[in-house]
Amino acid sequence: MPVLKNEASLSPAIGFIKYWLPVLIYATIIFYLSSLPGKEIPQVFAYQDKLAHIGEYFGFALLLNRAFRAYGLGSVRARFWAVLSICVLYAFSDEFHQMFVPHRNASLLDVLADGFGASAAGLFYAWRK
């Protein structure tokens, strides 16, 4: 198991709880929201789903970046591409999952919105650090 870069005194379990558990919980929440039938999602304004996708994956990418950085995994550029790849792969799996949810469908535009949110988070994270 990789060692925390800046917090070597933390046990592996505490490191997991602090950095990776939030990532897993967030991914589970995305999966849960994707499991809701389409009729249960109120349409408030046009393109709200795309904004939701951008926001969801912005948060997901921030959490992934945080975890990778804590363990010293790669440079800023390497983390950007790794996080973007993970987010896009998860987005594709999420859209595949939605093909089996009543009144939902798979959409490449949703994957693009997810990728945009993850990219924006990566740029924000790189700029902030």
Image (cartoon, rainbow, N blue to C red):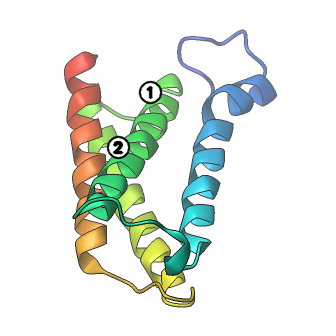
Mark 1: give few (<14), some (14-19) or many (20+) Cα within 10 Å.
some
User: Is label 1 in a helix, a strand or a loop?
Assistant: helix
Give the mark, 1 or 2, whose residue is nearer the N terminus.
2
What residue is shown with label 2? Answer: 58
Q: Amino acid at mark 1?
A: Arg
Q: Nearer the viewer, mark 1 or mark 2?
A: 2
Q: Residue placed at 23% from the left, 47% from the top?
A: 119
Eyeballing the image, is 71 above or below 91?
above
Instruction: Using the image, determine if residue 75 lies above or below residue 47.
Output: above
Cα distance between the residues tagged 1 and 2: 16 Å
Q: Which mark is residue 11?
A: none
Q: Which mark is residue 69?
A: 1
Q: How far across and how far down the image is residue 124, in percent?
A: 23, 29
- What x and y, as percent, mark residue 60? 45, 45
Q: Nearer the viewer, residue 34 or 25?
A: 34
Q: Tell me the quadrant of the picture where the C terminus can be found.
A: top left
Decide: is 60 above or below 39: above
* Residue at 44% over, 27% down: 69
Rendered-image quadrant of the N terminus: top right
Q: Position of residue 74 (x, y in %)?
A: 37, 35
Determine crowd level at label 2: few under 14, some 14-19, many 20+ residues with C-alpha closer than 10 A.
many
Dots 1 and 2: beta carbons under 8 Å?
no
Q: Amino acid at mark 2?
A: Phe
Secondary structure beneath disc 2? Answer: helix
> How many numbered marks have been drawn onto this rendered protein structure?
2
Q: Position of residue 32 (x, y in %)?
A: 63, 63
107 displayed left or right of 96: left
- Compare residues 70 and 51 and report the one nearer the observer: 51
Left or right of 57: which side holds 129? left
